[in-house]
Image: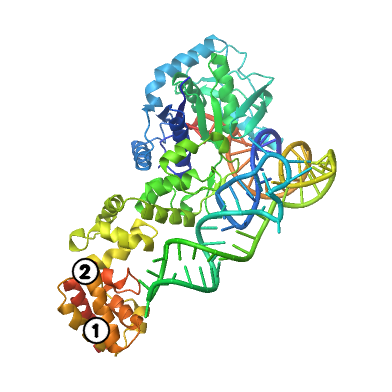
Amino acid sequence: MKVRTRFAPSPTGYLHIGGARTALFSWLYAQKMGGDFILRIEDTDRERSTQEAVDAILDGMEWLGLEHDLGPYYQTERYDRYKEVIQQLIDGDHAYYCNCSRERLDAMREEQMANKQKPKYDGCCREKGLKAAEDTVVRFKNPLDGEVVITDHVRGKVVIRNEELDDLIIERSDGNPTYNLTVVVDDWDMEITHVIRGDDHLNNTPRQINILKALGAHIPEYAHIPMINGPDGKKLSKRHGAVSVMQYHEEGYLSEAVINYLVRLGWSHGDQEIFTLDEMIEKFDIKDINKSSSNLNIEKLQWLNQQYMIKLDPVYVAEQLAFYMLEHGINIENGPKLTDVVEQLRERSKTLVDMVENCRFFYEDFEAFNEKAAKKQFKPDVIDVFNQLKEGLVVLDDWRAQAIHQVVEDTVEKLGVGFGKVGQPLRLAVSGTGNSPSIDITLELLGKEKTLARIDKAMKYIEKL
RNA sequence: GUCCCCUUCGUCUAGAGGCCUAGGACACAGGGUUUUCAUCUCUGCAACAGGGGUUCGACUCCCCUAGGGGACGCCA
């Protein structure tokens, strides 16, 4: 049988980091097994599902490169099929109509909780043989005894007694099917072989298996993967910063780094930290997924992101950088080639947004010198240094790092000072900050005209002190 | 409350009874390289939740306790 996995989000919000990892694991497994990866939108909650959320999920998947082979399927387009299956269950005496009021249900739940019992439907209408009516729902006849054994690929054997379960609603009074029914029908119809999903669904699994059995359907393999918590170990929430995967995009992370970060969260292959996509596919195995939940660690993501900026082709990274330059209002026509910027700044930036800020001075004049650096570097005697430098630079036709370096060296020699006495004030003068790529390359990329203008500007600043 | 699940350095993890004086990575601290910053590199810091078993031997197996998470909806 051909392996088929699926990612089945409900479109009630953006694609968050936990969902993205679930999708990644499903996708990886399908890739590894040469199977299909299906995207299914579970939009049966019509109140909360929105088109914006669908788009946000699709965007997130696309950015991460998690392409689906089939779909997206929308559950709202499959209502006829669900109706048919519900009828089949009723006809087979596996489901029944129930007219218990919400008030009765609520009161019962409260009472059970007060008695320290697990709240469950009491089966009131189970044998009444009710017909469909205005206010009736359809409930599944869950077996009363025996147990359900889940052989989960991550959790191992999990046994749930049927007496812990109750007769869940599979069709609402408005005629809409509910989640536990639709998942089962879809996984069955779509011939899903491996259900890889968050472990918040582990508790639903026995119910779903019972329905599958009643339908005479094949029961898929299951793998319930643990949750991802925020950096503080608490449940992921907006307070933790980036929750939507697209927020990582906005903050300047490469999708390659995010994928690599995500794959190592809850999964590992020995001591390896960095994986190409092909390596991931080759080495990924469900049995290597951890059982315990993991916490987000932004520092590690930042480290990975830098590793990827260094490792990836500068032409590609430059293409990505162009997006952020535009986004941050920098005109890339006013400065050096982006590939040069990438090569010079990738070891000095954690994210592409960092890189934008670090290269800004090549493209735009800055307002003020870094205060601390100016205090340290801009002393009156620097005027001599700048005059000397200018003398050499003005006449320099070959505006390249090597020649520029020679001018700086000559200045150092003539003035009989240390390199730092020349390089640092110069760096501050042209960049406005205390750090940049090596000074000769910085000047080369900045260009002769801007360099000289900025030295003049710095001299005026110093004279006013 | 009831049921289910989880528990190795601060964090991500390796570990399938002796290979463990518990390894790697991020972070952090210190050194080296770089007359900037970073990169790179070296060193250091730092963990088997607790208690009982089983065994010649337990991080690894079993039980209990504690802590954390999830489920218990006409949400998914």
Q: Name the amino acid type tagged 2.
A: Arg
Q: Is residue A416 above or below residue B30?
A: below
Q: Is residue A335 above or below residue A257?
A: below
Instruction: Estimate the spatial distance between the alpha carbons at disc 1 and disc 2, rounded to whole Å.
Output: 19 Å
> Relative to A310, is A170 on the left or the right?
right
Output the chain of dot 2. Answer: A
Percent coordinates x, y for residue A302 in the rendering: 44, 56
N-terminal of the two: label 1 or label 2?
Answer: 1
Q: Residue at x 21, y 86 (%)?
A: A387
Q: Residue A282 versus residue A168: which sits nearer the camera?
A: A282
> Relative to A69, is A398 on the left or the right?
left
Tell me the SS state at disc 1: helix
Residue A141 seen in the figure? yes
Percent coordinates x, y for residue A44 in the rendering: 43, 28
Q: Residue at x 61, y 20 (%)?
A: A142
Q: Count neighbours of disc 1 (C-alpha within 10 A) and say few if under 14, some if 14 to 19, many if 20 or more.
A: many
Q: How is the image coloured?
A: rainbow
Q: Residue A149 versus residue A440: which sits nearer the camera?
A: A440
Q: Which residue is mark 1?
A: A386
Tell me the SS state at disc 2: loop
Q: Using the rendered view, name the quadrant where residue A162 is placed.
A: top right
Percent coordinates x, y for residue A322 in the rendering: 26, 54
Both labels 1 and 2 in a single chain: yes
Which part of the image, by quadrant, shows the C terminus of chain A? bottom left
Q: Name the amino acid type tagged 1.
A: Phe
Q: Which residue is mark 2?
A: A400
Percent coordinates x, y for residue A229 in the rendering: 54, 48
Output the chain of dot 1. Answer: A
Q: Residue at x 47, y 36 (%)?
A: A282
